[in-house]
Every structure is written in structure tokens, then in C-alpha cells.
Image (cartoon, rainbow, N blue to C red):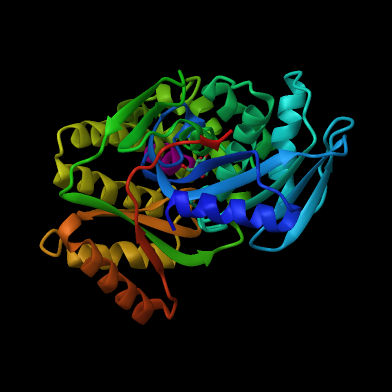
Amino acid sequence: MTLKELAAHVAAEFKEHYGREPRWIVAAPGRVNVIGEHTDYNDGFVLPMAIERYAVMAADAAAAPGRISVYDIHFKESAGIDISGAVTKGQPKWSNYIRGVLAGFQARGTKLPALEVAFMSTVPLGGGLSSSAALEVCTATLVEAATSRSIDPVEKALLAQKAEHDFAGVPCGIMDQFISALGREGHLLLLDCRTRKTELVPMSDPAVALLVINTNVKHELGSGEYAKRRAQCEEAAKILDVKSLRDATAEQLERDKGKMSEVVYRRARHVIGEIERTTMAAEGIRQSNWPTVGQLMYASHYALRDDYEVSCAELDAVVEIAESLGAKGGVYGCRMTGGGFGGCCVALVKAEAAEAIAQKIATAYKAKTGIEAAIFASRPASGATILKG
Ligand code: GLA
């Protein structure tokens, strides 16, 4: 479904549910991270792109004050959010992403308008493609539209990240909300997570395509392990006497290897290497040097699998299949993407072979794991937009 079709569908559902046309329609995309994994909370670089999968909201002012009603089109479930005082956590669970953002606007002194909202998302839930960031940034964009006041996109991303921390209890970095808010069609976003400076890296060579391969598994231990990894990185930085692993070099790590546990050493080795790989990959993309970018993607996967230990059998299976197709088969590189423990892989492939590669990966993955993968190609999409209003 194109964004236009999705917006028309959400508008029609709004009309069906509330009996009138929506006044505002807004959208925010999910993302796939091409490279730079588990580097954002280490002040490093990330290189994500927005994908052609979106959270879309249609809305109008509500007649009754003090409340924002949100109708989830897909699950046919509604949330009533009391905005007469400070917005709090509540039910249903998904409403907390929205509640968190509303609370963030209140904290900035915004007087929230009473609204009726319908929403739908084509970002696969729990697939590691930032469905929650899309929902948060979409909500923030709706508040901007409905109050006729836009906020700085960096502040918007930070507000959405805070919603994830405080209302969803996930201590995420800044990557997902940044790319959803700041993505640009035809571009990857090289984000320096320390300075928050961004650079748009054009990615419009028609000879290559990016495939997103959803393993359709999600292992539960993910969230606890994420917090553990963060703590291990902090420990490594402390031992190396640097503010964050961004400031450490591979030489320094080798020198001080004896001062830390073997596990902490490996965690730091991944992060330090990955920060370097990310800037190298950005350079490779600027020069359309696809074999180099592909090699960096494989190297990223191995480090995430062996040193950072956030991969899983299904993600490894996809990467092995991609590797066995190899450059001859049109695959430049492949890696897990996002937090790990399930979710998706991203593969850089020759555009002309993309469809055949997707087929082959799906067949081999099914044979190896018994699971159906969901595979799609996406061009770099635009970040959050107001489509109507
Ligand atoms: C999750 C987090 C991000 C980032 C990635 C790993 O997606 O939300 O902030 O840390 O994991 O790169």
C-alpha cells in the first residue's frame, strides 16, 4: 500500500467511525538501520533510513473537552485519554506510546486540544522496524498539525524518545525517533549521536536495492538484554577512562584488555569497530562502492553475533543464506538490523536480481527454520509529514 492509499484508507475509516471527514492527516515512517548497531547509546554514528511503511493518523477536533479519543483501525480498539490534567500511563498498552508523547507536549507547556483520532500502521509490530517510534513521531506530528505549531525536529525526536523511556519503559537510544522525524526521500541519515548533527547521504543508485527480511521471530529476552548491553558498555568506558566508547580506540582497548572481563571486552570491541564501520559505509555509499558497503555489513553482523551476542539462529540463518548466494547471485551484503534477538535483516542487493533473491531467501529460510519470512524492498522514504491540514 502506498502512503497515499494508506492515508485514503485511514481517512475513510475515520469517516466511518466518527461520521465526518478528518481535518488533519499525518504520517511517520518506520526505519531500517543499514549499519551502526548498538552505537547510538555509545555516542557513536548510525546510518538508518526511513522505510515505506508508516503509522498514519486522521483526526478532527472533538466536541467534548478534556479528552483525546484514539481508534486503532487494525485491532478495532479504542483508547480514551484524559487530557484535563497531566496525561498518565493507562490502557490499552499501545496507548502509552501516544500518552507519553502527549505528556511530553504538556511538559513543554502546550495546551492539548481535544481530538478524535483514527490510526493505522503498516510498520510490522515487534519486527525491529521501529513501529513504536513511528507511532510516537506520528502522534507528535498530529499535535503539531492540530495546534498549528511545529517544533524543531530534533526536539521532536527527543520528546518521542522520552515517551519511550518513561511510558514504555524501554531505555532506547535516539536513532529510531530521529530517523522517523528527520528522514528524507532518497537518502540515508548519517547521525552523530553525540553532537546530534545529521548528514543526508543520497542513496538513489538504481542499480542497487535494500531488502528487508523479517524472520518473523521475536525472542522475549530482548528488552532485558538491551539494558544489560548498555551497562556493559558503560563499564567498559569507565575502565578505559573515557566518557563513552565513542572516545575509545581499538588500540586503547587492546592495551587495557586485561583490566576487564572477557565479555565486557567483546562488547566494547563490537562498539568501537561498529562506529568505524559506519563512517566507512557512509563513505562507500557516497562513492557507490557497493562491494565495500556489503563487506562492512557482513562484518557488522559477525560482530553483533559473536562479540555483542544480540543475534539469534533465525537472523544468522538469513545472513548465511544471503552469503551463500554471494556477489555472483547479486547479494553485496546482509546483516541483522535493530536491537536483535529476532526481527529483521537488511540486505544490499543488485536491483535487477532483487525479486529473485527475495524468493530464494524465503525458500531457503523456510527449509532451514520451518518459518515463513516476510520480505520486501524499500526505497529510502520521507520522515514525518502532514498530509492534510
Ligand atoms: C533499538 C533501539 C535503538 C538502538 C538499536 C540498536 O532499536 O531503540 O535506539 O539502540 O536498538 O542499534
Residue at left offset 87%, top offset 35%: 66
Quadrant occupied by the N terminus: bottom left
Residue nearer the viewer, 36 or 209: 209
Farthest left residue in view? 328
Residue at left offset 39%, top offset 39%: 48
Q: Is residue 254 magenta?
A: no
Whole-percent x and y of residue 23? 65, 38
**Residue 310 visible in rendering:** no
Residue at left offset 55%, top offset 56%: 9
Q: Is residue 348 above or below residue 22?
A: below
Whole-percent x and y of residue 178? 49, 32
Whole-percent x and y of residue 318? 34, 65
What is the span of residues highlighted in magenta in the rendered image? 264-270
**Residue 106 visible in rendering:** yes
Residue nearer the viewer, 71 or 186: 71
Choose top left, top right, bottom left or bottom right for residue 147: top right
Q: Is residue 160 above or below residue 18?
A: above
Quadrant occupied by the C terminus: top right
- 51 on left or right of 239: left
